[in-house]
Amino acid sequence: MKKLFAKAFLILCAFGTSTLVFAQEAVVEGGGFHQELKTKFIEGSADFMSLVAITLVLGLAFCLERIIYLNLADIDPTKLLKSIEDALDKGDVEGAKTIARDTRGPIASIAYQGLTRLDQGVDIVEKSIVSYGGVQSGLLEKNLSWVTLFIAMAPSLGFLGTVVGMVMAFDKIEQVGDISPTVVAGGMKVALITTIFGLIVALILQVFYNYLLNKLEGILNRMEDASITLVDTAIKYYVKFKK
């Protein structure tokens, strides 16, 4: 798990480095999207904009780690379950265990836990499958709460920058004793830019989060179907060999 997160973070760091290089090239060339983005970032107050950028990087790191993990966990259980059933039809419990142990993914892990208790009765096998299914579900959902945290933090930081920008504008008014647009423009710009960037970050992370939820639901549904099939296979084994 830590290796996956580290890999995701390194990928994002590499992406950030390449983006910075492009921005520097845009500065040399005298314009472009990256130069405009850099300008707005500076105008939005580096303190708050840096916090929003860090929120984006960390949120994407967790999203990328979950995407890698869920894609590795998402396998077609049909072939696995058929191989286990064929092995049990021959009475080869150890062979079925080997198949489950050598296959990646939560369904294979659940199957292995059930097969290791096959000699204890169908009820124990079923309880083992259900219990370990809950463990695997927790592993699949791990770190999603961090993504929701960063989704909530990004606009909150943007709104905080808005409040600070408004305070800056009123400070300027107090200092010069004038409410002309020139006096308040700087503070208002900080307020609007931080809000915009905070909302953009939240929207980006929300898209990834919804993708992760959809992926997770699909895996959980296949896990439930596979669990039922595993229990049925265990029952057939007992009927055939444990009469």
Image (spheres, rainbow, N blue to C red):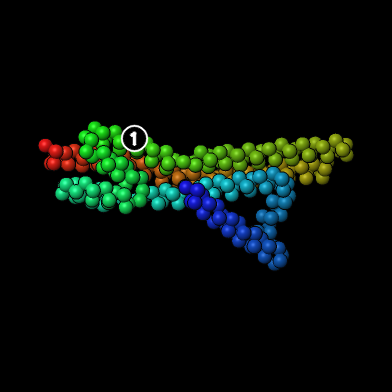
Q: Which structural element holds mark 1?
A: helix
Compared to residue 220, the image places residue 19 above or below, namely below
User: Residue shown at 69%/44% (left/top)?
Assistant: 48
Q: Is residue 207 left or right of residue 137?
A: right
User: Residue shown at 63%/43% (left/top)?
Assistant: 198
Residue 24 is drawn in which quadrant?
Answer: bottom right
Q: Residue 231 appears at what percent x and percent y?
A: 24, 38
User: Residue shown at 40%/52% (left/top)?
Assistant: 72
Residue nearer the viewer, 45 or 62: 62
Q: Residue 114 appears at what percent x and percent y?
A: 28, 40
Residue nearer the viewer, 99 or 42: 99
Q: Quadrant of the C terminus?
A: top left
The three-letter amino acid code for the residue at tag 1 is Ser
User: Residue shown at 17%/41% (left/top)?
Assistant: 237
Residue nearer the viewer, 167 or 132: 132
Residue found at the far right of this picture: 176
Q: Residue 111 appears at what percent x and percent y?
A: 29, 44
Residue tagged 1: 131
Q: Is residue 20 left or right of residue 101?
A: right
Instruction: Say if residue 77 shows up in the picture.
Output: no
Compared to residue 155, the image places residue 77 above or below, namely below
